Image (spheres, rainbow, N blue to C red):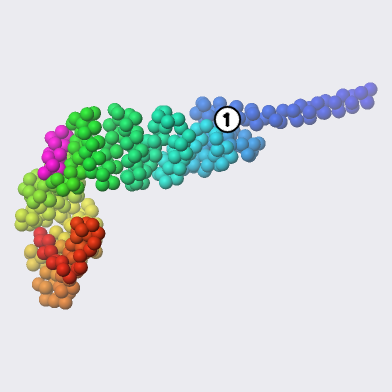
Amino acid sequence: MKRIVQSELALAVWLAAASAFAQTPSQPTDLRQSALALEQQGKFAESEQAWRAFLKARPSDAEPYAHLGLLEAHQDHYKEAVPLYRKALALKPGMPGLRLNLGLALFKVGELKAAIPEFTTLLKSAPPHSPEALRYTILLGMSHYGLSQFAQAAPYLKTAADADPQNLSIRLTLAHSYLWSKQYNRVLDVYREILNLDPDSAEADMLAGEALDEMNDSSGAIDMFRKAVQAKPGEPDVHFGLGYLLLTQKQYPEAIKEFQAELTNNPNHAQAMLYAADADIQMNQYSDAAPLLEKAIKLDPSVGLAHLDLGILAANDGRNDDALREFLAAEKLTPNDVNVHWRLGRLYHAMGRKEEAKAELAKASTITRSADQELYKKISGGQAKPANTLTPAAPINK
């Protein structure tokens, strides 16, 4: 009897062990199902625990890494998602959706240079003219755009714009890319396309105005900015842009009105203050300029023109020490501004510091000759004219 009981006990132990052994392979599967269910329920912390337990059982499986990355992305932890996606991709490069998730995570954390190869690989494998191809094309265009690689961005954005004729946002971004890569005629082409979608687009008018200004069509640029002001007077920088163009054409009273309109829209627009003050100085209205300059320089002390103009005001009042301080600050910020050196030279001369005056005026003359050389190179196709045959231009006066 005792032997029978012992045999039954041994059999029970063996069966239990065998049963446990038989269940071992199914445990990772159970963990996987549990992790997926928790993930679908939005229980991210519990799902992460389950995926990490699954990962311990299957350390060479790409799936847990991919889902752990996805859980981080769902919580906007894109930086944490990137290494998990990379690990999954190394283990299983062909996992559906994985490369796109990695590219998007890199894009969202601003690692655009690293995102570009991922989107490029996806675009190469996508069917031509498919929705997927369009998506990757847009992502590539925006990645290059975000890196200020505007010439590289433009072809992708042009393809995207052609594929989606009603997409105004892409066309505006394309126009910016053309403008900042100096493809001015193409800006105007896109401008005409934008007008078909939105005849009152102030942003498009401003872009066309900037392109015309770069093409030395000042009157055309001013007309475009006037149109933008009329279409949307509250558009950021619209009055400033028009004011700046009027300032370059020495239409000072009208420029000041536009700068004041910009300040009505945005009272802390430092550049509008600065250029309104500069226009006042051009008209010898020094008392109007002073408070604007003081406020502008508090908002942005790194602008050389503000220090230059404050120096001009101080010199006009006979405050030579204050003028010298401001001119030296301007020189530090804008060392290649001929007018700064010219003003410094004049001030040193008035203070009896003849050698320093001579040195500053020589710098002004050198900068002017250098600018003339560059201009001559452009005109003559790159063959520089000997420096001693060029007559230095007169210093720019304010």
Q: Which one is nearer the viewer's eye here, 264 or 166?
A: 166
- The answer to which quarter of the image holds residue 173 is top left
Q: Nearer the viewer, residue 92 or 71?
A: 92
Q: In this rendering, is residue 124 above or below 12?
A: below
- Residue 259: x and y in percent read 13, 46
Image quarter of the N terminus: top right
* Location of mark 1 (residue): 35
Evaluate whether residue 344 shows in this view.
no
- In the rendered image, which quarter is residue 177 located in? top left
Give the vertical position of 335 relative to 55 (above or below): below
Q: Amino acid at mark 1?
A: Ala
User: Does the stretch in magenta take in 220?
Assistant: yes
Q: Is residue 146 left or right of residue 345?
A: right
Residue name at image x 13 percent, y 46 percent: 218
Q: Secondary structure at mark 1?
A: helix
* Secondary structure mainly formed by the magenta segment: helix
Side of 133 relative to 322 (left or right): right
Number of labels in the image equals 1
- The stretch of residues the image draws in magenta is 219-233
Please provide percent x and percent y for residue 168. Answer: 27, 31
In the image, 311: left or right of 52?
left
Q: Nearer the viewer, residue 234 or 2?
A: 234
Res 208 visible: yes
Q: Is residue 142 magenta?
A: no
Image height check: is 70 above or below 337? above
Query: Callout 1 environment at 10 Å: few (<14), some (14 to 19), or many (20+)?
Result: many
Which residue is at 47% across, 39% downward? 121
Tell me: residue 112, above or below residue 98.
below
Where residue 11 sits: x, y (%)?
A: 85, 26
Q: In the displayed structure, does residue 263 sit left or right of residue 2?
A: left
Q: Which residue is at 39% across, 32% downward?
A: 134
